[in-house]
Image (spheres, rainbow, N blue to C red):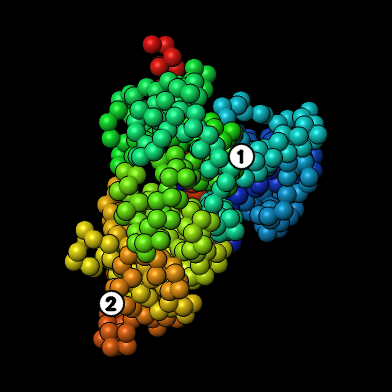
Amino acid sequence: MTADGWYRDPADRRVREAAPDLDVISLGRRVRYLRKHRGMTLDQVSAAVGTAPSQLSLIENGKREPRLSLLRALASTFDVTLDDLLGAEPPSRRAALEIALEKAQRGPLYQSLGLPTIRVGPRTSTEVLEAIVGLQGALERQLEEQIATPEEARRANTELRGEMRRRDNYFPAIEQEAGSLLEAVGYTGGPLSQHVIADIARHLDFTLHHVGNLPHSTRSVTDLKNRRIYLPRGDAEGHDPRSVLLQALGHHVLGHGTPSDYGEFLRQRVETNYFAAALLLPETATVAFLQRAKAARELAVEDIRDAFAVSYETAAHRFTNLATHHLGIPLHFQKVHRSGIIYKAYENDGVSFPADHTGAIEGQPVCRYWTSREVFDVPDQFSAFNQYTDTPAGTYWCTARTEHSAGGLFSLSIGLPYAHVKWFRGRETTARSVSRCPDPDCCRRPPAGLADTWAGQAWPSARAHSHLMAALPPGAFPGVDETEVYEFLQTQAER
């Protein structure tokens, strides 16, 4: 066989055709088994097949792929067929263990551990092989369980969203923790200032340190040993610096431990985001504000945003926490990319979101006639866009705005059934659309006229979303470079 993988002898192609994925390790162990079973030495077999003992040793150790002529000679010497020699099943249990160990030692996992190579000889007991191969298998299974594939992540997210729906997205224990902290530092009302947040950190016995060399894979780093929280100096890539700090404190206040799987990691993220919002928009003050607005029939997300000096997205999220529990208003929330893909969503009002077979909403394209899509084409991007949409599940009124972020242009929308629109500003809108999704004729299938003209005549080059097929970064905190974090903390501790 040449260096490029082709056989010099045309007849040798039959080996490639019969066994395109020839397992040289298994073949080598089978040759060794047959040689010993016949009571032959390496020298005797080498003389019989016309090759050097060193070459035959390389074949037995799975380090060289023999040509067809040599395979035929070996089969003749051992009095077996070529098919028997190339068979898939190991000739014995011990041979199977030796094959498994050799493959494991050549694999990336074993090599990444930096362990010495084990040379298996006649005196190596079968029990030792069983133990080593068993440990390798157990380690592989454990690591596989710790890696969250996109499907596992979607399932975890779907389960968590189901719990949020059952709770009406209201978590009283977190509300209580946030309220207790605000009371402890003497908060009296208004937007939560940096000064009050610093008081909260001091109350929890943490010192704050703004640095310019925060690990690139983090938004903050908490040194639990020295009770320090490291934060980025300047703009935190579009994130409200108050939220970044409050989320870091939230892990401590809520008693989070190292997450054991992606589901727990995701739950902790949701809880710390909730905790930060419950401090930025305190329950008592925010509910009083909402009740006054409801009584005046002037509920509006942008008013919540302005009253508490938060982003529109934070105000919309917080509204989902309090609207159903305190105001009796069921609703839904969406964050949709300009491409029409749902990034975040929540509902407890019966609206029908697109979903995959696992029930996951994130990553699905939303109907192009929904408010969350229509808002991108509205000339006035300064004011909220309000629209009624007739759907198979009923008529919904939605209010939406667009916001730029590092990931592009997104729409943020709050929607609710028609029966509750009377409490909201913007209910007088005349904008109306009809969505028949999930009927494919609604917006998924091209109109007949366009299809007749262009079907078979278009070949788009799709934008590759490689992250959809890749496993999420491994580790307790996916995407975080732990070595970088530890080196950062060591450097800071030595100053």
- Which SS class for mark 2? loop
Residue 225 vs 387, above or below: the answer is: above
Q: Are marks 2 and 1 in contact (CB under 8 Å)?
A: no
Q: Which one is nearer the viewer's eye here, 82 or 137?
A: 137
Q: Which one is nearer the viewer's eye here, 125 or 180?
A: 180
Query: Any mark on residue 260, and which?
Result: 1
Q: Is residue 439 visible?
A: yes
- Kindly identify the residue that appears in the image at 77 percent across and 37 percent down: 130
Q: Which one is nearer the viewer's eye here, 395 or 49?
A: 395
- Kindly identify the residue that appears in the image at 58 percent across and 38 percent down: 259
Image label count: 2
Disc 2 crowd, CA 10 A, few/some/many (<14, 14-19, 20+): few
- Kindly identify the residue that appears in the image at 45 percent across and 22 percent down: 202
Quarter the C terminus occupies: top left
Q: In this view, does 404 lie to the left or right of 248?
A: left
- Which SS class for mark 1? loop
Q: Distance between the residues labelled 2 and 1?
A: 50 Å
Tell me residue 276's x, y (percent): 45, 40
Kind of residue sitting beneath label 2:
Thr
Q: Which residue is most to the top?
A: 495
Residue 174 vs 330, above or below: the answer is: above
Residue 200 vs 272, above or below: the answer is: above
Q: Can residue 19 be seen in this view?
A: no
Kind of residue sitting beneath label 1:
Ser
Q: Is residue 191 left or right of residue 203?
A: left
Tell me residue 312's x, y (percent): 33, 51
Q: Which one is nearer the viewer's eye here, 346 or 493?
A: 346
Q: Which of marks 2 and 1 is nearer the N terminus?
A: 1
Residue 477 vs 290, above or below: the answer is: above
Give the image quarter of residue 441: bottom left
Tell me the residue that label 2 is attached to: 430
Tell me residue 368's x, y (percent): 34, 72
